[in-house]
Structure formats: structure tokens, C-alpha cells
Image: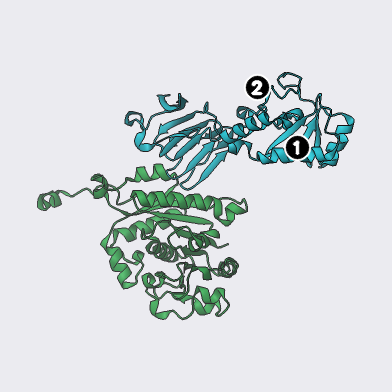
């Protein structure tokens, strides 16, 4: 039975789309049939981040309204056969997301995929609520700074009360914390909250810590999900996060100061 | 199965002596009481005590009584100590019949309008109501109101969350949001928490914001009470 995962945060600009792309691609690389859906109607970005913006014909809203079939709108990723992208409309807005239509589409997707990754818009209104409503799991994307943590707390509360599982008294949505744009230097300088601070305030299990990395900007500029970049620490951290999501144990990397080798110390003038 | 359809319950209900309703000084006192704790008295149920009262043998009198109480946001639901004729009229007016309440305080039996001291209705004491228990973190943006009783939270209260109780508030965790105890005016209510990091604390409407909390007590287990109209904060 397919699992629906929502990437949500409350706060904007923390890395939901980057993470949705990375996690979906990461799952596909692990052999899971995965589709990633853009719920940010009117402000779509997922197609850009996935590099398929020049192949969009029909979108999520077209399918909800019955103007197109699912297979006409789904875009197969060129890098991996298991990965599909479902872009949304740029010309409409979030009012076009009708809950019954979304449910119908998700039910149809469930027959063909192992994982359905939903990239939520920012905020706590209709668009964000619709994106999280049908979720089985939620990844709360948070930057280690106070506004982001406050908004993440809010969205966790909303998941506990306004999701379908909450409304029908089913097993609650399985929430995970993904700390993004983490910089150990800034934590040391007291500019950013530490991992322990965030864990203490939010009290949800930590899925992963993604270090701040220039490679992320390069990846979005080239429309390549970061996990396809073998060198990038952020990419590797996303792979670890996907592994943990699938139940494997992985140590947290990129969160401790790196041990500089003897020669690097000599030559690098610490 | 049928046994589960109807369950017994115990309620505390205000009793008003029927004779008092005609007394203008009674109405004045009642209005004052209600004004002090409007939330507590809003739609509160009232039983009319007909002991030693000769009138109220016609349903119009009950309709009138209902109207008088409604003016003070109270809802007349029944009668007590009624004579058979009064019972009939009460039933016709849609009122229930309650058994005589043994726990009433003894009061002067006369319906003398001059007895203003006994005019105030007996209010249901909030402390006998059940406590409400919350075991999950109270997330930002959440509001919880423990009506008529205490609130106990065994997790943290996030900034941006609001917890309120007519009685006491106990937080066995960090209190980082707003806590309002004695929300309907009970000045005896207290706030207890394991870590004081609140945005705002209030008892019966008297409040302090985060900035006004003594810095040396931040992050500590404290007990907050209202003494002489001022909030006091003590180490627990």
C-alpha cells in the first residue's frame, strides 16, 4: 500500500521543495516507485528544481478538474525510471485544490506508486492544509532559527488536529524533524540554535540534519535534485535521511567539527 | 446494551429561592455577581426552590421567572420542594422536578424582601469539578480551556500556545506560552510550573508579561499566586 509523505514547515523558504525533490529522488534511487507532487498552486517551483519545466503540458489542477488524465500529466524523470513528477498549475491559485478531487487523484496514484511525496506550500491556510490532510507521514522541514522553529511547532499542532487521520481518530501522522541549512560555525557563534535546542523545543524524532551547502543552489539552478550530486555533503545527508526513513540506522554526519589531518593542519594554518 | 444508553451524572446547580425573584435588591445583587464572573454564569442552570412559597401555581409565573433569570444570562431548568399543584404548573412550563438538596446551607425561612444578605444565589464551587489532563505538548497556536476546574499538563507548553482554567494550572514541563488561571474570576487559583519561561501569566485577570517576570526565576520551578491584587512568584 502506497505511503503518502508530506514535506511541510509553516515557514517559507526553509527547504521544503529542495527536500521533497531530494527525498523523492533518494527513494527512487533505492528502487521505490515514487511520485513527487507540487501543491504550491500559483507559485510552482518543483518543476524547476526537478529540471522538467520545459516538459509540462498538463498539471495537478487539470487532472483534479477532469481536463486531463493522470498519465498525461505525470512526467517521467530522465535520470531514474522509478521517479515521476506531478507539476501544478502556475496560472490558478490554491482555491483550485478541491479536497475530493485531491483524494481521487491520490487514490489513483496509490495504485501505481510505493511513495507519494507531497511538496506543501508555506503557511497554514488551504493550500498547506490540503497538502497535509491525506498524509501518513510528515517531514517537518526546519531551519535552526527561532522563527522557523515556532512555525514548525504550529504546523505540528495542525497535523495533530486537522489531518484526516486526526479527524477520523486513526493512528496519528508519523512526524519527523528534518533540520536544514545547518551550519556548525553559526551554532558555535550563537547565531543559530543547536540540534539539541531544536529537538527539545519540538519534541519529535530527528530524521536528519542537512548542512548548509553551496551545492544546493547549483543543484536548483541546473534542475538536478541534490542527491544526484555524489560530492555534496547536503546530498549525502539526504541519502542518510532517506535511509533512516526506511528504517535503517545511520550516524549523523556533518554535525561535528571535521578532524583535520596532520598535513592539512600544517598547511592550512588553523 | 440498553444500560449504556442512559447514564447517571452528578451536576452542581444553583438554587434560587422563588420568593427572591420579586425582590429588586435581589436582582441587583444577582446582576453584580454575574458581572464579576460573566463566563461562569453564562447559561448556567438554575433550580427554583418553592419551599414555603404559596404562588407559582400557574405556568405563566414560571415563564416570568424564566424571563427574569434569562435577563441575567441564567437558564431556569427545574424546581425543588414543590407542592403538587406547583409541580403540575412547572411541568406544563417544561421544568424538571429535582429532589430536595440536602447540602443546602440553612437560611432564614422568611421571604422578607429586606433580607438582602441572603439574596445572593449559592454558586457551584469550581473546585469540585473534574481536572482536565493534557499529556501531549501544547503546540503553538493551540488554545485549551479547562472550564470549571483545574488543568494539568504533563508536557511542555510552546510559545504561542494559550492554556486557561477556571481553577489552577499545573504544568509539569516548561511553560513557554500564556497561562491564565482563575479565568472566571477565582482569585484563589494558582499556577504551578516546572520551568517558568512564560510569555504571560494571569490569575483572575491580573497579569504579568514575560518582561515583568523576575529574571532570577526564569527557568525555575515556581508557584504563582494572587495576593492583595498582585501576583507573587515563589520557588517551588
Determine the CA span between mark 2 and mark 1: 21 Å
Query: In this structure image, what is the colour of chain B?
Result: cyan
Q: Residue at x 50, y 46 (%)?
A: B142
Tell me the subunit letter for badge 2.
B
Q: Is residue A14 left or right of residue B154?
A: left
- B192 or A22: nearer the viewer: B192
Residue B20 vertical placement versus A150 (above, below): above
Q: Which mark is residue B65?
A: 1
Q: What is the chain identity of the residue bearing mark 1? A: B
Mark identifier at residue A242: none
State which quadrant residue B176 falls in.
top left
The one of A25 and A154 positioned closer to us in this rendering: A154
| Residue B147 in view | no
Quadrant for the C terminus of chain B in the image = top left
Instruction: From the image, state the color of chain A.
Output: green
Residue name at image x 42 percent, y 74 percent: A77
* Along the viewing direction, whichever of B112 and B139 lies nearer the viewer: B112
Question: What residue is rendered at 69% in x and 22% in y?
Answer: B114
- Quarter of the image for residue B219 reads top left
* Numbered label tally: 2
| Classed neighbour count for the residue bearing mark 1: other residues with Cα under 10 Å, few (<14), some (14–19), many (≥20) | some
Q: Where does the image place residue A96, in percent across and percent down from the top left? A: 52, 71
- Measured as percent of width and height from the top left, residue A17 is found at 40, 64
Q: Secondary structure at mark 1?
A: helix
**Circle 2 sits in a helix, a strand or a loop, which is it?**
helix
In the picture of the structure, the residue carrying the numbered disc 2 is B117
Q: Earlier in the sequence, mark 2 or mark 1?
A: 1
Amino acid at each position: 500500500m502506497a505511503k503518502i509523505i508530506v514535506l511541510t514547515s509553516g515557514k517559507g523558504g526553509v527547504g521544503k521543495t529542495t527536500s521533497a525533490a531530494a527525498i523523492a529522488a533518494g527513494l527512487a534511487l533505492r528502487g521505490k516507485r515514487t511520485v513527487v507532487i507540487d501543491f504550491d498552486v500559483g507559485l510552482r517551483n518543483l518543476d524547476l528544481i526537478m529540471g522538467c519545466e520545459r516538459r509540462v503540458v498538463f498539471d495537478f489542477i487539470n487532472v483534479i478538474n477532469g481536463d486531463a488524465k493522470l498519465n498525461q500529466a505525470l512526467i517521467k524523470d530522465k535520470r531514474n525510471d522509478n521517479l515521476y513528477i506531478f507539476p501544478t498549475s502556475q496560472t490558478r491559485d490554491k482555491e483550485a485544490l478541491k479536497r475530493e478531487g485531491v483524494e481521487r487523484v491520490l487514490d489513483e496514484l496509490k495504485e501505481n506508486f510505493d511513495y507519494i511525496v507531497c511538496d506543501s506550500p508555506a503557511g497554514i491556510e488551504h493550500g498547506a492544509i490540503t497538502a497535509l490532510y491525506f498524509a501518513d507521514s510528515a517531514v517537518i522541514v526546519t531551519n535552526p532559527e527561532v522563527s522557523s522553529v515556532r512555525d514548525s511547532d504550529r504546523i505540528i499542532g495542525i497535523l495533530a488536529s486537522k489531518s484526516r487521520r486526526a479527524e477520523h481518530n486513526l493512528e496519528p501522522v508519523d512526524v519527523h524533524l528534518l533540520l536544514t541549512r545547518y551550519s556548525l560555525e553559526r551554532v558555535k557563534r550563537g547565531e543559530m540554535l543547536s540540534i539539541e535546542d531544536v529537538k527539545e523545543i519540538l519534541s519529535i524524532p530527528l530524521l536528519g540534519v542537512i548542512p548548509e551547502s553551496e551545492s544546493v543552489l547549483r543543484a536548483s539552478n541546473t534542475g538536478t535534485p541534490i542527491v544526484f550530486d555524489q560530492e555534496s555533503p547536503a546530498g549525502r545527508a539526504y541519502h542518510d535521511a532517506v535511509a533512516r526513513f526506511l528504517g535503517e540506522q545511520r550516524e549523523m554526519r556533518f554535525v561535528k567539527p571535521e578532524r583535520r589531518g596532520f598535513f592539512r593542519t600544517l598547511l592550512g594554518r588553523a | 446494551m440498553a444500560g449504556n444508553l442512559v447514564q447517571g451524572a452528578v451536576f452542581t446547580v444553583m438554587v434560587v429561592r422563588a420568593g427572591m425573584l420579586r425582590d429588586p435588591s435581589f436582582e441587583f445583587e444577582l446582576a453584580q455577581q454575574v458581572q464579576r464572573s460573566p463566563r461562569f454564569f453564562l447559561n448556567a442552570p438554575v433550580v427554583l426552590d418553592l419551599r414555603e412559597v404559596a404562588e407559582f401555581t400557574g405556568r405563566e409565573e414560571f415563564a416570568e421567572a424564566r424571563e427574569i433569570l434569562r435577563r441575567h444570562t441564567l437558564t431556569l431548568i427545574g424546581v425543588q420542594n414543590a407542592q403538587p399543584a406547583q409541580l403540575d404548573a412547572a411541568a406544563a412550563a417544561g421544568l424538571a422536578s429535582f429532589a430536595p438538596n440536602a447540602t443546602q446551607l440553612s437560611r432564614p425561612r422568611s421571604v422578607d424582601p429586606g433580607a438582602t444578605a441572603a439574596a445572593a444565589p449559592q454558586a457551584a464551587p469550581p473546585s469540585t469539578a473534574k481536572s482536565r489532563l493534557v499529556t501531549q505538548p501544547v503546540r503553538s497556536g493551540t488554545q485549551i480551556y479547562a472550564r470549571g476546574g483545574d488543568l494539568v499538563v504533563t508536557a511542555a507548553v510552546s510559545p504561542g500556545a494559550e492554556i486557561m482554567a477556571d481553577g489552577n494550572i499545573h504544568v509539569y514541563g516548561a511553560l513557554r506560552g500564556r497561562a491564565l488561571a482563575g479565568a472566571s474570576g477565582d482569585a484563589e487559583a494558582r499556577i504551578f510550573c516546572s520551568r517558568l519561561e512564560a510569555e504571560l501569566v494571569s490569575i483572575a485577570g491580573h497579569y504579568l508579561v514575560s518582561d515583568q517576570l523576575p529574571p532570577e526565576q526564569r527557568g525555575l520551578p515556581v508557584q504563582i499566586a494572587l495576593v492583595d491584587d498582585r501576583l507573587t512568584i515563589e520557588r517551588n
